[in-house]
Amino acid sequence: MQRYIVRRLLQFIPVLFLVSVGIFLIMRVVPGDVALMILVGPDGTGTVDPKQLEALRTKLGLNDPLYMQYFHWVGGVFVGDWGQSLRSQTPVWEEITNRFPLTFEMCTLTVIISVSIALPLGILMAMRQNSPIDYVARFVSIGGLAMPTFWVGALMLLTMVVFFNWIPPLGYTELWENPWNNIQQIIWACLALGYALSAVVARMTRSTLLEVLRQDYIRTAWAKGLRERTIMVRHALKNAILPVITIVGLQYASLMGGTVIMERIWNLPGLGTAVIDSINFRDYPMVQGLVLLFALIILFVNLVIDLMYAWLDPRIRYN
């Protein structure tokens, strides 16, 4: 197992290298001049002196050859210097660490909500296939797949304002500072995201569980007179859960950079908002740092999923 983990960690290196080169080149071919945007200001009313513009481009390193800019950035990452945001003039790593707790909490709570709804619902649909319970649960899950999360989030906000004359506290309060305020600020976005994700997980749980329930060893368990709960929990669910774990893990990884719309609707300053703001401002160091962080998180989550396979199914070996 240790050798497998080391081998997987070594595989991170070429993937992160390709990601870093890809995002570096993409940001350089995107139209727009960050030095010009800094000089004209956010409202676009500032004046631009050509000499001042050239001096700022030299100061930011934008006149250096591309390979020098790339090695300067990667070399800084290796020593813990992720660069400086061109928009806020603060270190990129500081910006990330300030926003990461919100996105991490939001993604974790969303997955908890999703799994808490989806697993019991999927099991119930499989146990009562083609019954009224199954039809109602499938209708609810299809609704989660069909309705965009931004529409669900906006509808929730509109309902609070129109019918209850109440909106959640704006901004973000850290969990350990004011837990009640924190929950009020992020729970609604998590519910909107969790509903959509739970639909996918519930349908996957139902289909994989139905497939397992048709296996011969399950018929043998029924013939031995085992209780339904024992058959489902001890024999069926454990073998059906592997694809579900894969889906949940991939959802968690994708959420880390995919919560931007919910953050916009609920006015939450997370990593998704930082990505959009940085792209709009051509903030190269910030975008590169965020994309590299997302790639690292996705690789790490995939490694955790693979390790969980062996824990759930002892037949899986990594040697």
Image (cartoon, rainbow, N blue to C red):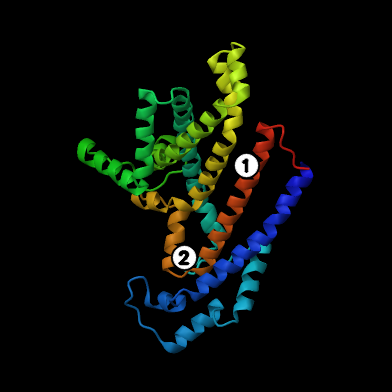
Left or right: where 27 falls relative to 76: left
Badge 2 or badge 1: first in the primary sequence? 2
Which amino acid type corresponds to the residue marked 2 in the rendered image?
Ser
The residue at the point 43 percent across, 69 percent down is 281
Viewer-closest of 71 and 319:
319
Is 52 placed above or below 278 here?
below
Residue with the most extreme bottom position = 51
Residue position for label 2 = 88
Mark 1 residue element = helix
Which amino acid type corresponds to the residue marked 1 in the rendered image?
Ile
Mark yes or no: residue 58 visible: yes
Crowd around label 1: few <14 · some 14–19 · many ≥20 (10 Å): some
Residue position for label 1 = 305
Q: Quadrant of residue 244?
A: top right
Mark yes or no: residue 176 visible: no
Viewer-closest of 176 and 227:
227
Looking at the picture, how far across and down is residue 284, in whole percent? 51, 69
Residue with the most extreme top position = 225
Q: In which quarter of the image is residue 152?
A: top left
Looking at the picture, how far across and down is residue 84, in whole percent? 54, 67
Any mark on residue 275, and which?
none
Crowd around label 2: few <14 · some 14–19 · many ≥20 (10 Å): few
Mark 2 residue element = loop
The residue at the point 46 percent across, 73 percent down is 30
Looking at the picture, how far across and down is residue 79, in whole percent? 68, 63
Q: How far is mark 2 from mark 1, CA to CA?
A: 37 Å
Marks 2 & 1, CB-CB < 8 Å contact? no
Viewer-closest of 201 and 81:
201
Q: In which quarter of the image is the C terminus?
A: top right
Looking at the picture, how far across and down is residue 154, in whole percent? 30, 46
Is 141 placed above or below 59 here?
above
Left or right: where 310 falls relative to 293: right
